[in-house]
C-alpha cells in the first residue's frame, strides 16, 4: 500500500487521477492540497470534496486549499474551453458535506511528511507552488518523504503552452525550479509520455460495461467530463474521440514505477528569460553514479498497460 498526498489543480484529467487514487486498493490518499491552474484553488478544493463523495472510498481524505497565485503573485488560470467553467468539464457533481481543513497547504504537506516518517509519496498534478512553499518553510522536506512524482514538463516533445514549456511547469516556473533543485527523489512524468498515452471512447465503453456498482457514478462522471476534454483535443490536435492522459499517468507511475523507463538527469527550470519560461534545463556534465540530486525523467511508458490498469480499478 502506497501512502500518497495529491497536490492538484483539479481539472478534468486531475479528477480522473484523483478518482483512480481513491479507488485503487494499492493507494491510500492521505490528503489533497489544491492549487490555482485549471481553475482557482478554491474551485479545485470544491471539486475534490465532491469527487471524494463520488468515489465511495470509505475513508476520510482531508483537503486543504493552497496557492491562488504563483510564488511571485501572478494569477493565471487555464482558458475555460479546456476544463470548463468549474474545472471539471461543467459537470455538476452532488455537493459534499465535508469541509476543507482550515490550514496552510504547505504546513499540511510538512505535517503529513513528518507523520508518515519517510513513507509519504507526493504526487503533483498542477503547479509546484505549494511544494515550493513547503520547501521554503522546511528545506529538510526532501529527506522526509519517499518520493515526489510530478506530472509536468517536456524534454523532446513540444510544449503545450509555448514550444518549449508545459503548463504545470510554465504556470509557476520559479516554484518548479526550486522543487527540481531541492534534492527530492523525483520522477517527472511529462508530455514525452503523457502525450503518447490516450483514453478513447472505446475505453469508456469498456469501463461502463464492466464497472462495479460502487464505481458506476465515478465512471459515468468520467465519461461526461471527458466530452469537453475530447472536444478540446479535437480542436487543438485533430484527435477524434480521444484525449491525452496527463495526470492519471503520474498516479499510475506513483503506484507502480515499473510502468515506465527513466533517464536520470540533473535539471532546473528557466524562469527569467520570457521566451524560455518553463523550459527544463539539464546539466549533461553530471554523472549519475557519482552525483546526487538527479531527477528520473520518464522517457517511455507502457501505455496499453497503463490504460488497462487505469480502468481496472473501477471493475
Ligand atoms: C497539465 O496541464 C493541465 O491542464 C492538466 O491538468 C495537466 O496537469 C498538462 O500539461
Ligand atoms: Ca492538472
Image: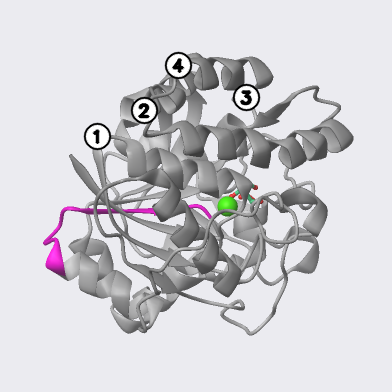
- Nearer-N-terminus badge (2/1): 1
State yes or no: discs 4 and 1 in contact (Cβ < 8 Å). Answer: no
The x, y position of residue 167, in whole percent, is 67, 54
Report if residue 182 lies within the magenta region. Answer: no
- Nearer-N-terminus badge (4/1): 1
Assign a secondary structure to mark 2: loop
User: Which residue is at 50% across, 67% downward?
Assistant: 45
The alpha-carbon separation of the residues under discs 2 and 1 comes to 8 Å
Viewer-nearest of discs 4 and 2: 4
Q: Residue 198 carries which label?
A: 3
Q: Which of 41/273 is in front? A: 41
| Residue denoted by label 2 | 313
The x, y position of residue 111, in whole percent, is 22, 74
Q: Which of 283/122 is in front? A: 122
- Give residue 73's quadrant in the image: bottom right
- Nearer-N-terminus badge (3/4): 3
| Residue denoted by label 1 | 25
The x, y position of residue 230, in whole percent, is 75, 33
Amino acid at each position: 500500500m502506497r501512502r500518497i498526498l495529491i497536490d492538484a489543480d483539479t481539472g478534468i484529467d486531475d479528477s480522473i487521477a484523483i478518482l483512480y487514487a481513491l479507488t485503487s486498493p494499492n493507494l491510500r490518499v492521505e490528503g489533497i492540497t489544491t492549487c490555482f491552474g485549471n481553475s482557482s484553488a478554491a474551485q479545485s478544493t470544491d471539486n475534490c470534496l465532491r469527487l471524494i463523495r463520488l468515489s465511495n472510498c470509505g475513508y476520510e481524505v482531508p483537503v486543504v486549499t493552497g496557492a491562488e497565485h504563483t510564488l511571485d503573485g501572478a494569477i493565471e488560470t487555464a482558458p475555460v474551453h479546456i476544463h470548463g467553467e468549474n474545472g471539471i468539464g461543467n459537470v455538476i457533481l452532488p455537493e459534499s458535506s465535508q469541509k476543507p481543513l482550515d490550514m496552510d497547504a504547505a504546513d499540511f504537506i510538512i505535517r503529513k511528511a513528518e507523520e508518515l516518517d519517510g513513507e509519504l509519496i507526493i504526487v503533483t498534478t498542477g503547479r509546484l507552488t505549494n511544494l515550493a512553499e513547503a520547501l521554503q518553510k522546511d528545506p529538510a522536506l526532501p529527506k522526509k518523504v519517499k518520493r515526489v512524482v510530478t506530472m509536468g514538463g517536456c524534454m523532446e516533445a513540444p510544449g503545450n503552452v509555448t514550444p518549449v514549456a508545459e503548463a504545470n511547469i510554465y504556470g509557476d516556473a520559479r516554484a518548479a525550479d526550486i522543487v527540481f533543485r531541492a534534492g527530492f527523489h523525483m520522477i517527472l512524468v511529462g508530455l514525452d509520455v503523457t502525450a503518447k498515452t490516450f483514453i478513447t471512447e472505446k475505453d469508456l465503453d469498456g469501463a461502463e460495461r464492466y464497472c462495479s456498482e460502487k464505481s458506476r457514478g465515478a465512471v459515468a462522471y468520467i465519461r461526461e467530463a471527458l466530452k469537453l476534454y475530447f472536444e478540446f483535443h479535437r480542436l487543438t490536435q485533430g484527435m477524434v474521440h480521444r484525449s491525452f492522459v496527463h495526470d492519471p499517468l503520474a498516479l499510475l507511475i506513483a503506484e507502480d514505477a515499473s510502468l515506465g523507463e527513466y533517464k536520470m538527469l540533473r535539471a532546473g527550470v528557466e524562469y527569467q528569460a520570457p521566451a524560455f519560461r518553463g523550459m527544463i534545463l539539464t546539466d549533461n556534465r553530471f554523472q549519475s553514479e557519482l552525483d546526487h540530486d538527479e531527477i528520473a525523467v520518464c522517457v517511455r511508458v507502457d501505455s496499453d498497460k497503463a490504460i488497462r490498469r487505469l480502468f481496472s480499478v473501477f471493475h
